[in-house]
Amino acid sequence: MVSPILTARRPIIEVLQAAAQRLESAGLFFGHGTDNAHDEAAWLICHALQLPVDKALPDRLLNAREQRQIASLIEQRIELRQPAAYLTGSTWFAGLQFQVSSDVLVPRSPLAELLVNQFQPWIDASGIQTVLDLGTGSGCIAIACAHYLPGTQVTGSDISLPALQLARLNAEANQLAQRCEWVYSDVFQNLSTQRFDLIISNPPYVPELRQQQLPDEYQAEPALGLYSGGDGLEHAARILLGAARQLTSEGHLILELGESADSLQQQLPMIPFIWSEFEYGGEGVLIASRALLQTHERAITHWYQSRNGQEET
Ligand code: GLN
């Protein structure tokens, strides 16, 4: 006999509340697209019922089949402890939709707010013609740059080939493929002949030892995209060392460092980096003009070399 609970038609709002409670009591981590059980449940329900996530849920009864589909997705989220985006196969960033897989981090970054605002009030975007997104993953930052800065030519780079493949698909799906180019490169290695008006990056910046402390949802993400040496600054150091040479004379670097930002500023106290403020949350995003990086080139080089145990030349 079919369970009486599933044969009864139930109002969608009741199903939503039950799903949210189930997620809440399972001790999950929310931080890969939503920050609470209710929004996560609504997202999974929209996916199961193929409803748009940006509209209110319709006020209707759900049949047994629909309830089963939802329950199965909710249980997967709990059992697998993977970010919801890996189960649905897509997510949103800066108002655009992106396909994701476990080859890439789930798009999330305070940089979305800067992109939507065309970097106001920090940078005059009218001068930007070329952009490099270092460590592009799903391509979300590069593609959002192409979308919000319509005149630009954007390069996204990564050391993950599956990530670059996904980024290419995402550019096509967002009808921006003509202004996006994808390059296999370890930081600036294969880009040395090019200069950009803007270099933007959300590189790995989590100190390696923190890995064991992070929730399961992070363990499902590619380590390549998260961890950066003992202090979380290995990639940041390489980017800061090379950026001036890759920027045009009026160019800027925008670098997300999250929880490792304080450590960077303490290690380079003489450099007056700008730290962006955010209306919708987030911190640890550095903005530096090429001129600033050049002025402090010796300090950056010295810092880089002493981190890597090299003598100053
Ligand atoms: N703590 C960051 C996050 O989860 C890590 C991202 C990164 O290393 N770029 O968003």
Image: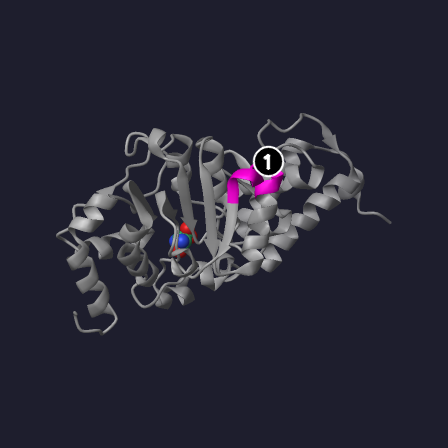
Residue 38 visible to the viewer: no
Residue 107 highlighted magenta (yes or no): no
Q: Position of residue 31 (x, y in %)?
A: 46, 48
Residue 19's place in the image compared with 186, above or below, is above
Residue 208's place in the image compared with 21, above or below, is below
Q: Position of residue 150 (x, y in %)?
A: 47, 30
Label 1 beta carbon less than 8 Å to ligand 1: no
Q: Position of residue 63 (x, y in %)?
A: 78, 36
- For the rendered model, the colour scheme is one colour
**In this rendering, would 9 be left or right of 186?**
right
Disc 1 target residue = 175
Badge 1 marks a residue whose secondary structure is: loop
| Disc 1 residue type (three-letter) | Gln
**In this rendering, would 183 be left or right of 250?**
right
Q: Principal SS element in the magenta part?
A: helix
The image quarter containing residue 232 is bottom left
At x 70% / y 50%, what residue is drawn?
A: 72
**In this rendering, would 66 be left or right of 126?**
right
Q: What segment carries the magenta color?
A: 171-180
